Image (cartoon, rainbow, N blue to C red):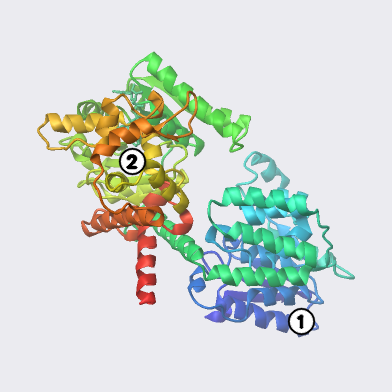
Amino acid sequence: MTNDLIRRSDSDGIALLTLANPPVNALGLAVRQRLAALTADLEADESVRAVVLAAEGRVFVGGADIAEFDRPPEAPHLPDLIAAIEASRKPWIAALNGAALGGGAELALGCHYRIFANTAWLGLPETSLGLIPGAGGTQRLPRRIGLELAIAVIAAGRTLSATEAREAGLANRIAVGDPIAEAREAGLANRIAVGDPIAEALAFARTLEGALPPPASAAPLADPGPAFWDEARARTAKAARGNPAPAAALEAIRVGVAEGFAAGLRAERESFLRLRASDEAAALRHLFFAERAALRPAALRGIEPVPLTRAGVIGGGTMGSGIAAALAAAGLEVRLAETGPEALAAGLARIEAIFEAQVQRGLTDRAGAAERMARVAGTVGLGALADCDLVIEAVFEDLAVKRRVFEELVRLCGPEAILATNTSYLDPERIVEGLPHPHRFIALHFFSPAQVMKLLEIVPLTATAPRTLATGVALAARLGKIPVQAGNGEGFIGNRILKRYRAEAEALLLAGATPAEIDQAMRAFGLGMGPFEMQDMAGLDIAFRAREAARALGQDLPEGPGDRLVRAGRLGRKSGGGWYDYAPGSRLPQPSPDAAALIAPFVTPGPRPSGDGIAHRLIAAMAEEGQRICDEGLAQSPSDIDLVEVHGYGFPRHKGGPMFHAARRAQARKDGE
Ligand code: NAI
C-alpha cells in the first residue's frame, strides 16, 4: 500500500514521519508523491509545530531509485520537494539512523536540522554512477561545510562519518545513548549503534522555539579565485579516469559560487539531466546492478555460508602474501604456512610491506597496520592449519605439489573445513580427485595483487556443495571483492579472454600496427596499459616457456614475433627491453628499432589497422570470446563477463565492460540504419 511508504504519527505538536521503503528507503516516484502530499498537509496543519523526518531499517535513505534512470524523470521531482521543505515555516529535523546517500543526503541537507546516530554517515556517490547530485547537493553542501570538503564529498566520493559531520557543522547533534554501553563498545563506536536518533530528534524538536536558522541556500560562499578552480579541475580530471561526471559536478559547484545559489541549481539540474541520459551513466548503472546481483546470487538465496574466523593460507609468495593480507585486513585470523623458515620469513615480510604501503597510501594508520599484522601468524608445514575454517592454497603452479598439499589437508582438517585452490591454469578437479568429503573443495581464483584487485573468480567443482559456494561468495563480500562464478574451463573466464585478447593484439601486429600504436589505442580507450606494455611488465619468458613445452609435446605452434624477441634475449622490462626498449632504471617504454626488425619478417602486406579501428577489434574479440564462454555455460551471464574485465583487468568502468560496450555499439549501428 502506497500510504505505508511514509508513516505519520503526531504527538505534542510534533509530526514524526517514518520512511519505510525497504531495502534502502529509496526515493522512488511513490515515495516522492507521498512526501509531496505530506509536506503540503503538514504546512497547512496548525496543530503541527515541527517535523521529524526519520526512516526505518539500517539505512536512512540510500538515494534515488536507480531503476527509474532508464526512463524520463517524473514529477514530483526531488529538487522541488526539498525546496518546499527548506521553505517550510516549521522546523524540519532529519533523524539519520544510518547512511544518507545521494538524494537521501540532499533531503537531509534541505532540512533545518540534522541529528545523526553515531553509526550514521553521509555521502554523495552520484559520480560513481556517471551523474552529479541533482537535487541541490552541489549547492547546499558547500554552503554548509565549506568548499574544500564539499568538493571531496561531491567530486571524489569522500564520505562523512557522524563525527566528521558534527565537526563540519552538518550534524547538529549525535545521538548518544547509555554512556556505560558506549564505554563498553569503545573502539567499536562507529560500528555499534548507541543512542536512538529518533528519540533524540523528538527531544530536540521540543526544545525549539523562535525563528528558524537561515537555510543553506541563503549562506554566502566566497569565490576563492581562478587558481583554486584550476587546481581542483586538474585534480578531479586525473582521478576521474575518463568518467565525465566529477568535472561536471565541480563545474556546478563553481557556477553556484560565482553566480549564486539559483544559477548554481540551474547548472546542476542541466548537467544532471544531460548526464542521466549519457552512455557513461548507462554503463555505470549496468555495473551497479551487475555487482549487486553478483554479491547476492539468486541460486544461493537462503543458503547459509560457513562462518569464518580462522583462515589458513599455504604459500607466502606473490599470491599467498596478498591473499593473507586481504584476509587479515578483513578481520580474519590468518595462519600463513610455508615450506621452511626462510620462505616463511620472506612471506611475512611481504605481508608487512603490503600493510606499510597501505599506511603510506592512507588506507589505514600505523595502529591499524599493526592490528592487521598481529592477526597473521606464520607457520612451517601444514600442522597448524588443522583448526582453520577455510584454507586457501597458493603454492607453485604444479599439479603434483598441489595434490600433495591437499592430501595432507584432508588428513589434518575437519570434514567441514573449506579447502580452496588458487590455481590459474591447472584443472582443480585433478588436484582433489579421489579425496574424501569433496563437497568442501572449491577454486577461489584471486588476481594479482590480491590485496588490491577486486575480482574473485569462484569455481565450483562437480561435487562442491551450495554451502561451500555460498561461503566463497560471502568471503568475497567480506573482503570487499566482487565474486564471479566461473565454470571449470581452461583459464576460467578472465585468463581465457586474456589469451584471446593477446592473440588478437598479435594479429594486429602482423597486419602492420606497431606495439606503440596498439598500446596507445587501448590507453585512449581507457585501459591503464596496452597489451604489449603489459607483457613487457610481466615478462615474455613465461608464455614462451609454456609454448616451448607445448612444442616439445608435439604441438604445432608456429614461431611468432614473441618467440623471436625472447630468443634474442628480450624478456621485457627486466632485461632492459621486450616489445619496447627501456633506459636503465626507467619504466618508460620507448619504441624499439631492434624489436621492429625482429617483428618485420612476420608482417603481411595489406591495409594497416589504426586508432579506433585497433581498439574496436580488440574489444570485439574480447566480447566474442565472452559470448562463447556464456554459450558454453562457463559464465552465468554477459554482465559477469563485464565484471571480470572491469575488476580483474582494468577495463574502464565508464565503458561498462566488453559485453555492454559491444551490445551498445551494435544497438547504435542498428539505430543508425
Ligand atoms: P610464488 O612462486 O610467488 O609463490 C609460491 C609459494 O608457495 C612460494 O613461496 C613457495 O615457497 C610456497 N610453497 C611451495 N610449496 C609449498 C608447500 N608444499 N607448502 C607451503 N608453501 C609452499 O607463486 P604465485 O605467483 O604466488 O602463485 C601461486 C599460485 O597462485 C599458483 O597456483 C598460481 O598459478 C596462482 N595464481 C597466480 C597469479 C599471479 O599473478 N602470480 C594470479 C592468480 C593465481
Q: What residue is disc 2 on?
A: 445
Q: Is residue 371 left or right of residue 515?
A: right
Which secondary structure, mark 2? strand
Kindly identify the residue that appears in the image at 73 percent across and 68 percent down.
264
Q: Nearer the viewer, residue 315 or 332?
A: 315
For residue 372, the mark is none
Viewer-side residue, 123 vs 54: 123
Q: Badges 1 and 2: C-beta atoms under 8 Å apart?
A: no
> Residue 179: x and y, percent?
72, 45
What residue type is disc 1 on?
Glu
Q: Is residue 415 visible?
A: no
Q: Give the labeled residue for mark 1.
A: 43
Q: Quadrant of residue 102?
A: bottom right
Q: Estimate the x, y position of residue 230 in percent, counting from the top left.
A: 71, 51
Residue 414 vs residue 229, the one in the foreground = 229
Residue sitting farthest toward the front: 605
Rendering quarter of residue 265: bottom right
Label 1: how many residues lie within 10 Å, few (<14), some (14-19) or many (20+)? some
Q: Position of residue 498 (x, y in %)?
A: 31, 45
For marks 1 and 2, the one nearer the N-term is: 1
User: Is 22 above or below relative to 511?
Assistant: below
Q: Amino acid at mark 2?
A: His
Q: Quadrant of ligand 1?
A: top left
Ligand 1 within 8 angstroms of badge 2 C-beta: yes
